[in-house]
Image: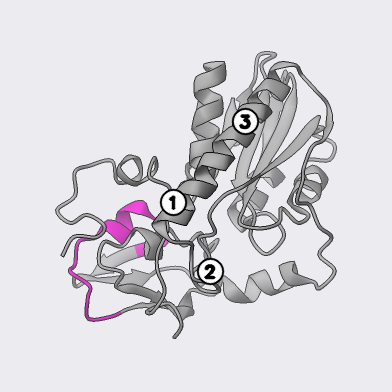
Amino acid sequence: MIFVFSGTGNSYHAARCLSEAFQTDMVEIAAAVRYKRFAYDAKGGDVGFVFPVYFFGIPSIVSEFVENIAVKNPGHVYCISTCGGTSGEASEQLQEKLRGKLTVDASYDVIMPDNAVFAFDPPSKEKAAEINAAADVTIGGIIESIRKKEKGDFRTTARKDVDGLYSKYEEYRNTEAFGFDERCVECRICEHVCPEQVIRVYHRKPVWDEDKCSLCMSCLNLCPKQALQYGDSTASRGRYFHPDYYMWSLGVNPKYKYGDE
């Protein structure tokens, strides 16, 4: 089984590649937390954790999940962290939170396009396609390594969080920074795609119902009109989502699609 959390599709794509290669199920971490599904029986099969790196560490929703998880009869255990530049200390954080419950046998990382539009302008569509093509090669190598049951730390971009960046994550998770502008067309896609179901549409406008979220940026990046914003800097920036993720995350044929005029 593969436990996966994804906001804009990078980790979803990696997990799907593994799921297809090994013919195993994917378990959505956000849904598992929402419905308090923490007990699993791996029946001797491999157990994978696939998630993005936020602020050099693991997303808050992943942290909550692994703190409560109970997996019986695990086989080979591995983790894959997707990242825009560095996988930081995400693997170490995961292993610490799993201490006494599961031992991670192998750790990997995959460079994929950055979706943190609150901090950076994401790559162009052409550059993102180039990065994702390279990522697929990396994922293919990871699949072969897992197939061989290799053990060890195979990350290539891990770095110590010497600047204490992860300590700032809590501040950035405040949802008061989110808002929308006049481009909002009341399509409710943000409400639909939010993996933690933090967004609700009241009186036809999105409202962030919780004080904090994991900061996955799904709402901003999947808004078809780029109407959702985080602070003052995102209105002029582009958006990013993995092409495999878009329609899957919507689950329906929406009235509006990303890039529609």
Q: From mark 3 to mark 1, how far is it between C-alphas?
A: 20 Å
Q: Main secondary structure of the magenta part?
A: loop
In the image, is residue 182 part of the stretch drawn in magenta? Answer: yes
**Res 252 seen here:** yes
Compared with 160, 49 (above or below) is: above
Q: Which residues are magenta?
A: 181-199
What kind of residue is marked 1?
Pro
In the rendered image, the vertical position of residue 75 relative to residue 102, given as above or below: above
Q: Secondary structure at mark 3?
A: strand
Q: Closer to the observer: label 3 or label 1?
A: 1
**Closer to the camera, 129 or 179?**
129
Count of numbered tags: 3
Residue marked by disc 1? 195
Which residue is rendered at x = 18% and y = 56% of the image? 256
Q: Earlier in the sequence, mark 3 or mark 1?
A: 3
Instruction: Name the residue located 48 percent from the left edge and 55 percent from the top edge.
Output: 127
